[in-house]
Image: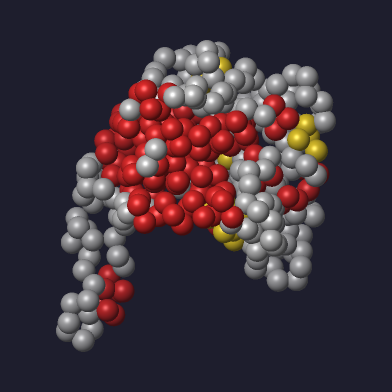
Amino acid sequence: MFEHKYADAKPILDQLIGSGQTAGGQKYTLVNFEDNFNAATKNSAESVFAYQASVNDGSQLNGNYGDVLNFPNGPGAPGGCCGFNNPSFNLANAFKTDANGLPLLDTWNNGTVVSDSSNLYTGNLDPRIDWTMGRPGVPYFDWGPDSKQWIRDPATNGVFSPKKNVYAKSQAGTYSSTETAFWGATSIDANNVNFIRFADIILWDAECEVETGSLSQAEVYVNQIRNRAADATGWVYSSGSYNAGNSRYSSQTKPADKYKVSPYPAGTFAAQGQAYARKAVQFERRLELAMEGHRFFDLQRWDNGTGTMAQILNTYQQVEKNRNSFYYTNPMAQFHKGVNEYFPIPQKQIDVENSTGEVNLKQNPGYN
């Protein structure tokens, strides 16, 4: 996929979709959305490749150490520390949907803003937003309503908390560590880290269909993901209590917001053409996989020397510097085309590789 060899990738992905199985012998399929991020339901039929996290088993090393700073911050907050990696207003706005429940592919970041009390959006939302991020006043598992008090620095962190990596209050001490000190006792848990899940496979294959196959089949794949999101049994509700055993709410009479998400009408991709279909697939990846560590690498992969990554991220910066975000206090931050697509290679590693006098490793462009 990184080499854009879609014709080579497609048969592999087709096989995984048609007959792929988990290590336990289950056929790959989509499960309840939140089950992918719940330690009690991990290693499901959607799990293709995951880091196996565990706690309270004597190892003290197998928890999700990569997330220890990325929980809501402060007393009473889930995890208790340390308020980093907060979702942005830009991401929240991406979950807006139109009157028909479809994404606003070109205008999602215009107009009123999701959860911005001074300029509040009141339209439809994709329900995946409230499993992806904590929003003020919206139920946060069984911890109660998400609170602005959980934000370390509202001027630079906005109003949203991460959620996909966080456990329920009823799971504390069972799926969170009791063996470690400092923040470990609250921020290390047994929540697996999904490197690849079946939704990722489906959306990769949708990309391949857009580039080398059938726009109609790409639409079928995207709609599989959207139909799962439209299943109201898997939404967040203000009514009832959260059941951490099955990732659902006991009473489902009052959704937590004005949710509306629908599949694309049959024939939309074919009628609108390849550029539209490509945009729709890429946008769906952002919605489905948000806060799972894919976005930077997707933008890097799609760029392919075109400069689109710099364009997207610098446009992001221009808007977000006027909102409560990192860019509000760092307004001059900029993404440089041809440089920031890759990180610098450590000089020590370059020295080791080239120690014989033969140049085997060169620094990435722009870092010399």
Q: Residue at left 23%, top 61%?
A: 364
Q: Residue at left 32%, top 37%?
A: 313
Q: Is 89 above or below relative to 360? A: above
Q: Is residue 337 left or right of residue 194?
A: left
Colour scheme employed for the rendering of this structure: secondary structure
Q: Is 265 above or below relative to 241? A: above
Q: Is residue 44 left or right of residue 173?
A: left
Q: Residue at left 39%, top 38%?
A: 214
Q: 97 or 116: which is nearer to us?
A: 97
Look at the image and tell me in which quarter the C terminus lies: bottom left
Instruction: Mark yes or no: residue 63 visible.
Output: no
Question: Percent from the top left, x then y, of residue 135?
Answer: 60, 28
Question: Percent from the top left, x then y, of residue 213?
Answer: 37, 42
Callout count: 0
Instruction: Mark yes or no: residue 312 visible.
Output: yes
Q: Is 139 above or below relative to 306? A: above
Question: Percent from the top left, x then y, of residue 16?
Answer: 54, 54
Q: Residue at left 40%, top 28%?
A: 269
Where on the picture, by quarter, is residue 123?
A: top right
Q: Is 150 above or below relative to 346? A: above
Where on the picture, by quarter, is residue 268?
A: top left
Question: Percent from the top left, x then y, of residue 236?
Answer: 69, 29
